[in-house]
Structure formats: structure tokens, C-alpha cells
Image: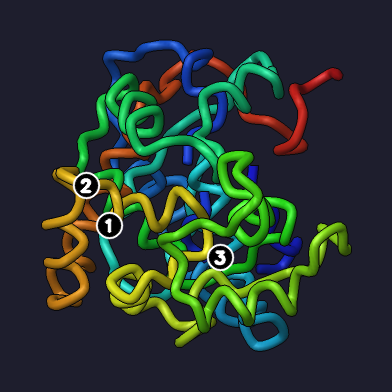
């Protein structure tokens, strides 16, 4: 799993323990709190905007949070967030880790994981665009810099200038917790430069660059489209966030409302 600093919006990363969430026939709704808390959207937005003044990385952290379980909307593209999801009665870190794509997995494996929860290739490429901001520790891509696939050489898909910069930031056998920008060009801006970086072989993670560098992959044309059309990316990202939020939600009387988000009530 990637690491973002505690205050780092939107992506990294995607689903909590998706395989452990019960199927529900009830539907989420953008008006779920209309009667009980009609100003919830503006309240949440104001809190996020205030926090953003102190730490621009909070947007990446919140995106990653939704990648795991839920989402707060702020910055970049906008959409009506469907709410009403309740919390699971179980917590299984190993199960969650097995469902969430790792930064060193092959494109084929990640595509299969997305497909298993009803997300398609466009969703995969669009949601990966959340790496338009945020940070990743050296340990999640260090093997690309010195010993890719155990061959004792760097990943041949890495831009040589970018490789040199990363090797300076993340020396071999160095501190694996040093943070690096996922998007080296516009580090805290939600835009389509993530895809432009892939075109020049400047994807930080193996899973990033494989979207464009895997021969014959259907993801290549999508990357090209998003790199050349930011509006297309924003529209696809918004829809994919909705799709991801609709993965087997607990609603109605299912699950619980946790008093502490990180653990089951009573634990």
C-alpha cells in the first residue's frame, strides 16, 4: 500500500475490504441528509477549505480515504456525492490489503481486481489519475531505480533524467520513508498532467507507468485521451468515483454508524 502523510484529496488509492462488504438492494442518494442535516455539503466543504489552508496535501489524503471506504468532495472535478453508506461490522486488514492493488503489481492483476468489483478499464485509468497529487515513499518504487524485476538494472521505461532525480532522492539502501511527489510537474494541483507525465515515461509507480508502457494494452488510448483532454478526464473521474462509491454499500439497517471511523463499535 502507498503512504500519504496524515494531511496529504481525492485518490491514491481505492476500496476498503470490498470483498467483505455485504450486497444491498437499497440505494445511496445525494439527498440522504436533506431532512436530518440539510447543510451537510457546505459544512464539510468549509471544514475542508479551512484545513486546506494549513496543508495542501489534505486533498490527496481524502482521495485515498475514499479509495478505501468513503469520500469528501473538494477541488478538481465536481459531482453529486451519493451518501447513506453505513459502516461494516467487521475489520480485516489482511483482507483489505489483498483486495487493494499494490504499487508493484502488473497491469493484468490490477485490471482483474477492478473487474472483480465491477469497475472497467476506463475506471482504472481515470481513478489512477488521482495520483495527480499526493506523495509516495521511496520503498514503494525503489526496485524500479536499481533492481527492476531482479535484473540488477533500472526499469527501462523510466525517463533517464527523471530516473537520476529519483535515485538522488531515494539512494539504494537509503531511507525508504522519504516522500516523493506523485506528479513532479504540478504537485498539489488536480489536473491532467499525471497522464502527460506517463507519455514522457515519468510515472512514479510501476502501476502508473504500465498504463501507458504495456504493449497492446487498451489503457494506452485512454491515457492519450486524458493527456490531451482535461475535460474528458474530469468527466470520467467524476463518474468513476461514483461507480467506486457504489460498490456493494451497506444501507438501511445493515452495518452500523461507527463512533470511531477506524474501528468497530465496542472494540
In the drawing, what numbered circle is on residue 215?
2
The percent position of residue 226, horizontal first and vertical second, equals 19, 68
Q: CA distance from mark 1 to mark 3?
A: 23 Å
Residue 91 shown left or right of residue 129 in the figure: right
- Name the residue: 21% across, 35% down: 120
Report helix, strand or loop for mark 1. Answer: helix
- Name the residue: 69% across, 19% down: 94
The percent position of residue 173, horizontal first and vertical second, equals 86, 57
- Of label 3 and label 2, which has the lower sequence position? 3
Tell me: residue 243, above or below residue 143: above
Residue 25 shown left or right of residue 216 in the figure: right
Tell me: residue 114, above or below residue 32: above
Please give the residue where the numbered disc 1 appears in the rendered image: 212
Please give the residue where the numbered disc 3 appears in the rendered image: 60
Q: CA distance from mark 2 to mark 1?
A: 8 Å
State which quadrant residue 145 falls in: bottom right
State which quadrant residue 258 falls in: top right
In the drawing, what numbered circle is on residue 189?
none
Amino acid at each position: 500500500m502507498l503512504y500519504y502523510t496524515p494531511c496529504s484529496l481525492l485518490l491514491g488509492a481505492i476500496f476498503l475490504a470490498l470483498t467483505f462488504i455485504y450486497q444491498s438492494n437499497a440505494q445511496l442518494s445525494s439527498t440522504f441528509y436533506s431532512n436530518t442535516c440539510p447543510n451537510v455539503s457546505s459544512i464539510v466543504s468549509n471544514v475542508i477549505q479551512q484545513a486546506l489552508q494549513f496543508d495542501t496535501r489534505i486533498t490527496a489524503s481524502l482521495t485515498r480515504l475514499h479509495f478505501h471506504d468513503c469520500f469528501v468532495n473538494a477541488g478538481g472535478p465536481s459531482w453529486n456525492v451519493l451518501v447513506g453508506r453505513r459502516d461494516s461490522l467487521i475489520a480485516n486488514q489482511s483482507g483489505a490489503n489483498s483486495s487493494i492493488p499494490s504499487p508493484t503489481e502488473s497491469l493484468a492483476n490490477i485490471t482483474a481486481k477492478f473487474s472483480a468489483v465491477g469497475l472497467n478499464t476506463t475506471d482504472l485509468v481515470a481513478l489512477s489519475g488521482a495520483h495527480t497529487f499526493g506523495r509516495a515513499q521511496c520503498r514503494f518504487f525503489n526496485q524500479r531505480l536499481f533492481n527492476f524485476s531482479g535484473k540488477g538494472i533500472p526499469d527501462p521505461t523510466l525517463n533517464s533524467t527523471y530516473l537520476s532525480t529519483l535515485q538522488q532522492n531515494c539512494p539504494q539502501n537509503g531511507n525508504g520513508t522519504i516522500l516523493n511527489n506523485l506528479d513532479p510537474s504540478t504537485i498539489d494541483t488536480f489536473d491532467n498532467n499525471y497522464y502527460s507525465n506517463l507519455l514522457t515515461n515519468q510515472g512514479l509507480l510501476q502501476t502508473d507507468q504500465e498504463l501507458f508502457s504495456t504493449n497492446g494494452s487498451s489503457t494506452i488510448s485512454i491515457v492519450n485521451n486524458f493527456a490531451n483532454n482535461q475535460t474528458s478526464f474530469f468527466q470520467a473521474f467524476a463518474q468513476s468515483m461514483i461507480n467506486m462509491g457504489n460498490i456493494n454499500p451497506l444501507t438501511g439497517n445493515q452495518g452500523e454508524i461507527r463512533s470511531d471511523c477506524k474501528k468497530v463499535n465496542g472494540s
